Amino acid sequence: MPVLSPVVDLESGAVLAVEATLPAAARGPVDVSVEAERLAAVGRRVAAQEPLLPLVLPVPAAAAAASPQVPGLLETALRRSGRRPRDVTLMLGADLADLGRSDVVRAVRHARGAGFRCAFGTDVLSPDLILDMEPFLFRFSPETVAGLPGDERRVAKVEGLARIGRGGGVFPLAAGVATVEQLAALREAGVRLGSGPLFADEGWAPGVRVRQIPEMPVRGGGLDLNGGPRVTEFIRPPADMPLDAKAEEVLEVFTNDPALNSVILIDHRERPAAVLDRARFLLAVTGPYGHALHAGRPAERLADPPRTIPRHAPALVALREAGASGDRVYDDLVAVNEFGQVAGVVHVGDLIAALSGH
């Protein structure tokens, strides 16, 4: 019987996903058929209990490496339950640390080949493995988290691996968070995701509220940027396209929606990679020889780097971010979720109007 727990944003307290855990299986030879059937049954049960939020499901790393049948059968079971693989992350178990590099590569390939995101369920990893394999998540064990903030070695480990993960677009998840002091240390290290008894008791079920995250004191004096409305109040639906979209395809999108300010180009993880501002794009494409020069070529050539802001950030922080951008002050901001994926766009004019009282 899987135990379900909420994966929580350590800043906002929002439940971002539901994670299932199973009792540790006995070590030994992997029976692929038995393991595949067992995980498919877990997938069906969890999908029936949580039909909406993203799922994190456990898979022994050795089983995932042994055969593509293991994630393949799970994928079939989830689709029949109405869940898409793209909304499910397979957490390769702590036995990952016992595997050779070639087995890790196979496990990741098999999981991704079935359409799943991949996560590493251990922090006993070399940094280069995280950078080379680019899992969606990796997990700090409850034993590591329990040493915070007093154990300097564990603090250094968390800070170092979290920094490496952020640099590669990989999100650390802290398991077993039990105290406010641990929460503060994780935030300080840049860890945004967590689970544990601080947020919910054993027996938690999807739909049950989690405990509110304690307020942290505002550092320093002066203007409290944490006050006032949040970015979520100003988010508009985004117009996004793949990073390899052609300029003529973007032109069609702008032509069909005269009110559209920008188009966001996203990578394979749905993260913003570039932004096309309407005025600058149309000036380039519709000017003399512009269509001939640009139409059949990648639109990214005409794009700017995205200006991102967390979707739960205070509006004052978003306005300050906009004001720091020089000649792009009035370009749309891209609101991102806790995984760095596009959640929408924010018009700077809306922020100014709301915060000035107009």
Image (cartoon, helix red, strand yellow):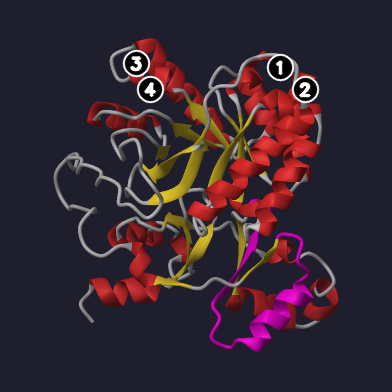
The CA span between labels 2 and 1 is 6 Å
Q: CA distance from mark 3 to mark 4?
A: 5 Å
Q: CA distance from mark 4 to mark 1?
A: 24 Å
Does dot 1 land on a helix, a strand or a loop? loop
| N-term mark: 3 or 2 | 2
> Are the residues at dot 2 and dot 1 in contact (C-beta closer than 8 Å)?
yes
- Report the side of 202 relative to 223 (left or right): right
Identify which amino acid the numbered label 2 is placed on: Asp
State the image coordinates of residue 86 (x, y, percent, origin top left): 65, 53
Query: Which residue type carries mark 4?
Result: Val
In the rendered image, residue 268 lying in the magenta stretch gets the answer yes
Rendered residue at 68%/58% (across/down): 80
Residue picked out by circle 1: 99
Q: Is residue 97 above or below residue 195?
A: above
Near mark 3 (Cα within 10 A), the count class, few <14, some 14-19 or many ≥20, is: some
Q: Which residues are magenta?
A: 243-269
Which mark is first along the chain, 2 or 4? Answer: 2
Give the spatial CA distance, label 1 vs label 3: 26 Å
Q: Tell which circle, 4 or 1, labels the residue nearer the N-terminal end.
A: 1
Question: Viewer-proximal residue, 147 or 82?
Answer: 82
Q: Nearer the viewer, mark 3 or mark 2?
A: 2
Query: What's the distance in space between the residues labelled 3 and 2, CA to CA?
Result: 31 Å
Residue in the foreground of this view, choosing between 172 and 255: 172
Tag 2: Cα neighbours inside 10 Å, few (<14), some, or many (≥20)? some
Residue 285: % across, % down: 73, 78
- Report the mark closest to the observer, 1 or 3: 1
**What residue sits 56% from the left and 17% below the top?**
124
Amino acid type indicated by mark 3: Gly
Residue at the spot of label 2? 103
Task: Give coordinates of residue 153: x percent, y percent.
Answer: 40, 11
